Structure formats: structure tokens, C-alpha cells
Amino acid sequence: EDQPLKLGNVEKPSCGPNDVLVEIVTAGLNRADLVQRRGLYPPPPGASEIMGLECAGTIVATGSEVSGWSVGDRVCGLMA
């Protein structure tokens, strides 16, 4: 796209039984994000439309099947 990138607000996602919900403190865009935006790198099926494959923050909710992670844990991630 020729449009500039912009920040926006989205609805708070739900936390499934095998998920953790992270309050994002920082996120990053990398080359894969920008190539995907140009339509040259398809996202995997079911992937979020929100750009940014990298993030860091704090867990604010955990699903009923999650073990090894707790609310308050600081995490970083590379999403698919």
C-alpha cells in the first residue's frame, strides 16, 4: 500500500483455554510484516490482521489449560 502506517485501537481479544493475554508494552515491525503488507508474503491461516510479529509485555490473563505461565509474568514473543 502507498498509505502510511498508523496506530489504532482494536477490541480486546478473548483468551481461549490454551492462550495467554498479554498487555503489550512494545511491538516491532520487521521485513516480513512490510512484505506481507505489500501482498507478497501471505499470513498463515487464522493469523491476526494486526501487523507486528514481535512484542513484549505482561500477562494479564491465562486460559484454563495454561500451565507454566502466570498473570504478572513479563514475556516477549514472536508470533506466527
Image: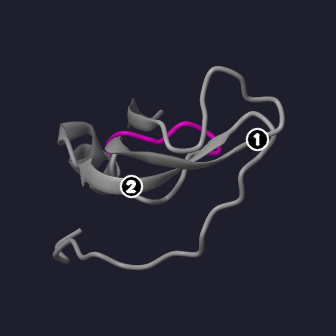
Residue 48 horizontal side relative to residue 39, left or right: right
Q: Which mark is residue 78?
A: none
SS class of the residue under badge 2?
strand
Q: Amino acid at mark 1?
A: Gly
Q: Main secondary structure of the magenta part?
A: loop
Residue 35 vertical position relative to residue 69 in the rendered view, above or below:
below
Q: Which mark is residue 63?
A: 1
Residue 54 percent across, percent down from the top left: 31, 40
Q: Amino acid at mark 2?
A: Ile
Report which quarter residue 35 is drawn in. Answer: top left
Query: Which residue shows up at 16% across the image and 75% down it?
Result: 4
Residue 6 vertical position relative to residue 62 in the rendered view, above or below:
below
Query: Which residue shows up at 36% across the image and 79% down it?
Result: 8
What span is colored magenta in the figure? Answer: 40-46
Query: Which residue shows up at 62% across the image and 41% down it?
Result: 20
Query: Which residue shows up at 71% across the image and 23% down it?
Result: 67
Q: Is residue 80 magenta?
A: no
Which residue is nearer to you in this view: 27 or 40? Answer: 27
Judging from the image, the colouring scheme is one colour
Q: Which residue is mark 2?
A: 24
Q: Which quarter of the rendering shows the N terminus?
A: bottom left
Residue 16 horizontal side relative to residue 25, left or right: right
Report which quarter residue 5 is drawn in. Answer: bottom left
